[in-house]
Amino acid sequence: MSVIGAFCVTVMKDVCLNERMPGKCATCAQVCPHSVYALNMETGEMKVQNYNACVGCRICTEFCPTNAIRINPAEPEHYTRYPWTLGAIEEIHYKALTGEYLLRGFGTHGQTPNFDMITVVPSQIASSAPLDKYREECNMEVVIGEGTCQNPMTLQLPFVWPAMSFGALSKEAKLALAIGAAMTGIATNTGEGGLLPEERWYSHGYWDEAETEHIWEPGGALIVQWSTGRWGVSRDYVNRGDAVEVKIGQGAKPGMGGHLLGAKVTADVSKVRGVPVGSDALSPCRYYDVQTLDDMKHMVAFLRDVTDYRVPILFKLGPSRPYADVAACIEAGADAISIDGMVGGTGCSPDIVTQGVGIPTIACIPPAVQALKDYGVHHKVKLIALGGIRNGLDAFKCLAMGADAVGFGSAAEIALGCRVCYACHKGNCPYGITSQKEEFRARLDPIEGGKRLANFIHATAEEIKILTMLSGHGCTAELSSEDLRAMDLNTAAMTGLKLVGYERVLPIWEMGIRPEAAPSGNGKKHRKQVAAG
Amino acid sequence: MKIYDAQNNDLKTVNSYLKESLNGKPVPLKNAVHLHGLASGLQHGEVLVQGDTGDYLGVLNDGATIHVTHDTGRYLGDNMTGGTIIIEGDAGFGAAQYCYGGTVVIRGSAGDFTATMNKGATIIVCGDVGSEVGTYMLKGDLIVLGNAGKNFANYLIRGSVFIRGQWQSLGNNTRQEPLTPEDLQRLQEYFTTYQIEADPAEFKKIVAASEKPFYH
């Protein structure tokens, strides 16, 4: 479903200030970044001039002094006229008018298989007794790179902020993420847009570059991303991270590189990325300097060498062929692998790619875990699940399915104030999260944003603690698929979890069939090795 | 001068040796063709490699001078930000990609995708280059004395591309522009510095047609 035409704008004239006193209030027109409202300069009257332009960000409702505006989704029409909904019709009109396909920010919408049809199995008398959330400890620490580098990266809670670049996000949002990480002991990630100077010391909890004034406890970690566009990347850059992440793909647009439209390439972004102001920064879809898996192994080797074997090397995958892709990452020498499901976020992507390419997160985790087990490295090479994870319940399910940590990308943006309008790519985010415009950025205070993010993480950690302990565990590392049940056949078939009532995994999983290998043959080669013992 | 023999040594051992030995004097070494990522991330000093080298020579170089007497493998000088790399022979696929600065001189020929996403380095190839050379270049100079393959300077955004020979086809978003006196002077300075026999006036200059060439 297209974003355009998805919302109905209603202005209640009986309470609208402008209606009673034309010219006295033009707040909605002033704050709307999408020109939904128009002010008649002669009469002072306000009107809705373009209903279809509303993306549902609801900044007008936030600012309206009399609470006169209602933004409602046009959902009933979705049911009555499907598939020819207003959104579908407007999309065709747009293409016919402009010759251009649609872009979208944020991520996938609509129904995709998710965690909702999985339930948590609590402890009772037959299993180990539940633990007391209020009076007993629950260890959630995750260490990445033990035994492979001098300084393994420790996450005090099993969370990361996934890669979100400067350019896609504002400076204020990036710094808020760093502060949020510092306040919770988790890791933030540069994304592929280079490193903001403050990002390093803020993420560690320091106010100053020299790292003498520690103001945010306990201090977090910084992951620097190495990607196909290599924006702002240098020897110095890779040495500033507590880990280096090699980006292969992302959930919202697997098989494509990063998109940063020219509207968001400001002087600051240009300086960091080396792209002319106003010129689109379109990252390549693949590494020009990697052609084979052996090349990837060499890349990992030189990244370890350049960083003096101090920090772990992570990989980030889009949702394609999880078993074969994870196997390839293991062979390349990864210390941790992030796998981003199709609901993962993006600053900008072709609409059809975000909506129709890739596989959901819950279907990525089981084959990824299987690959790790087949190589004998499950929980040694850490698995980080990303893509559409909303709360502690989703996160718990990922951990119990075999992940070691989870990432909150979209949820982090929402915690900063985002209302999910899917228009990040336009650069007009009224909450200052995905905009580079001064007037919008001024609405986001990095320190306040960092506190909101930390609050979200603390609350989510408590949720995981509740679920872990009521399942009879004192540590998230003890969780297993036995702590979960699928509540329908589809979910049981996709995940290999036991089906409620049936209390067994479905026969298709008991047959032990390995997932399909990649066409490149990497997976086939691996299967032969496994078969040969 | 003692020549370090890299044969039978792994990347970590050899690069550690280089980092410890670069203290003002050139460090010679030989038998390094099996190493991919040799002399990575160096910030100063001079390395003299006798013979051929493997892939990713001088990756992330940030100030060192690296001189190779014969050929080098793929991805030479990958993502370097400073320093100089001189190859007396040929370079394989993807030489000098993703570079932000520094100079790469290849006295022989170079493969496809050389100088891809160049963001500020000077890259000189005295022989021929393959196809897709100079793709998505954003800054810097690319100078080719020989001929080029298909899609030369494809989707050029900024920077200058100079070629003395012919191309099979020019890439998207390119146009030819006359050489300026500043161009001629700059080319002559490069040729003098790196002892290359060429007349700057024989070169053609290619620049970007637009800084915003993409569909979106």
Image: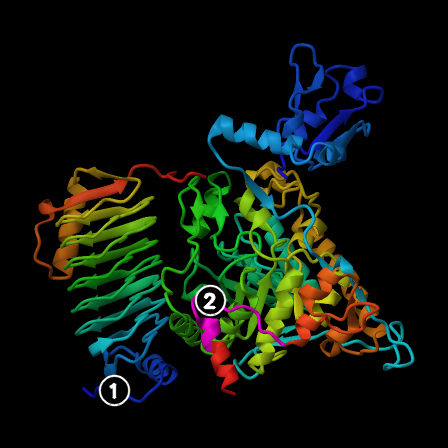
Quadrant where the N terminus of chain B lies? Answer: bottom left
User: Is residue A172 in the magenta section?
Assistant: no
Position above or below: A216 against A438: below
Which segment did they paint magenta? A512-525
Q: Helix, strand or loop at disc 2?
A: helix
Circle 2: residue type: Val
The residue indicated by pointer 1 is B4
> Where's residue A37, x and y in %?
67, 23
Q: Residue at x 73, y 54 (%)?
A: A452
Q: Please state the horizontal and vertical placement of residue B104, each as a whole percent of the image.
A: 24, 62
Question: Is residue A156 in sight in this rendering?
Answer: no
Query: Depth check: A206 or B155 in front?
Result: B155
Q: How is the image coloured?
A: rainbow
At x 73%, y 29%, the residue is: A8
Q: In terms of depth relative to the viewer, which is nearer, B151 or A352?
A: A352
Chain under numbered label 2: A
Density class for disc 1 (Cα within 10 Å; few <14, some 14-19, many ≥20) is: some
Label 2 close to label 1 by CB (< 8 Å): no
Q: Is residue A461 left or right of residue B153?
A: right
In the displayed structure, A368 sits above or below A106; it is below
Residue A238 - label: 2
Task: Tally the numbered discs.
Answer: 2
Q: Label 1 is found on which chain of the structure?
A: B
Q: Amino acid at mark 1?
A: Tyr
Query: Can see residue B172?
Result: yes
Q: Residue A18, how many percent across, how many down?
A: 76, 18
Q: Please name the residue shown 69% across and 56% down the image.
A: A113
